[in-house]
Image (cartoon, helix red, strand yellow):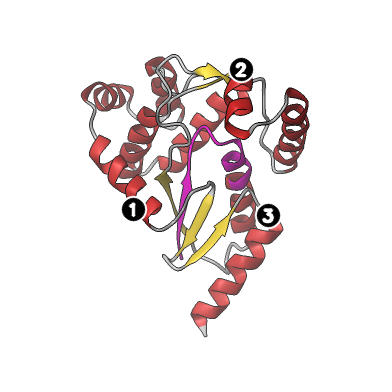
Amino acid sequence: MKIDFVSDIACPWCAVGLNSLEIALSRLEGTVSAQLQFQPFELNPSLPPDGEDVIEHLSRKYGASPEQLAASRKVLHERGAAVGFRFGARVRVWNTFDAHRLLHWAGIQGRQRELKHALLRAYHTQGENPGATDVLLRCAVEAGLDPEQARDVLGSGRYADEVRQREAYYQQLGIQSVPSVVIDDQHLIQGGQPPEVFEQALRQIANGAST
């Protein structure tokens, strides 16, 4: 079973969704064999390098009051804790294009999932800028990647075209929100679903494929 996890580092529900999906896959071990790969999506492609205040950004984007944002954040933190992801204080939002370039390279190196988790922790738990070279290099090391090769990828602009092509491909499929989980290029599950939802869906898809 091929699973494409379309997401952005800047998306908090992607962190919840990924942990939920991995819990579901662990429950289905021995029943479902899955190849998980990560595909790029940018929520804020036009953000400048220095980012933007998170409250100002979300208030403008969603028309929500600070009180509404606080209530949503409380629900998000609770959902994260339920699947083993800890959210910290995040005061800014940043551009994530370089993170996606590094993730593309990590996929070639066979360490994409490890880098994805490191980047999500840096952004959502530690409140760090995933567009900053030092943060990206530290995450690469945490993921077991060679830091000098990672530095070369970041400095050269490599894989920019590949990331843009993958982003365009999923946009053309109609994906406008993340996380979006595409299974075997046919089935779509959207949102940071609980593990039970992913487990049931994957089981049904696997059973259908085997009949």
Q: Secondary structure at mark 2?
A: loop
Gap in angstroms between the C-alphas marked 2 and 1: 31 Å
Name the residue located 57 percent from the left edge and 29 percent from the top edge: 121
Query: Is 127 placed above or below 41 here?
Result: above
Name the residue located 45 percent from the left edge and 26 percent from the top edge: 139
Q: Position of residue 89 (x, y in %)?
A: 66, 20
Name the residue located 57 percent from the left edge and 78 percent from the top edge: 207
Q: What's the amino acid at mark 1?
A: Tyr
The reply to whether dot 1 and dot 3 touch (C-beta < 8 Å) is no
Q: Which residue is mark 3?
A: 195
| First along the sequence among labels 3 and 2 | 2
Q: Residues within 10 Å of mark 3 (few under 14, many from 20)?
A: many
Q: Residues within 10 Å of mark 2 (few under 14, many from 20)?
A: few
Q: Position of residue 9 (x, y in %)?
A: 49, 34
Q: Position of residue 71 (x, y in %)?
A: 78, 32
Q: Which residue is mark 1?
A: 169
Q: Nearer the viewer, residue 208 or 96?
A: 96
Q: Is 8 colored magenta in this rendering?
A: yes
Q: Is 173 colored magenta in this rendering?
A: no
The reply to whether dot 3 and dot 2 touch (C-beta < 8 Å) is no
Q: Secondary structure at mark 3?
A: helix
Q: What's the amino acid at mark 3?
A: Pro
Q: Which residue is mark 2?
A: 91
Residue 39 is tagged as none
Mark in the foreground, 3 or 2? 2
Instruction: Give the magenta range.
Output: 1-17
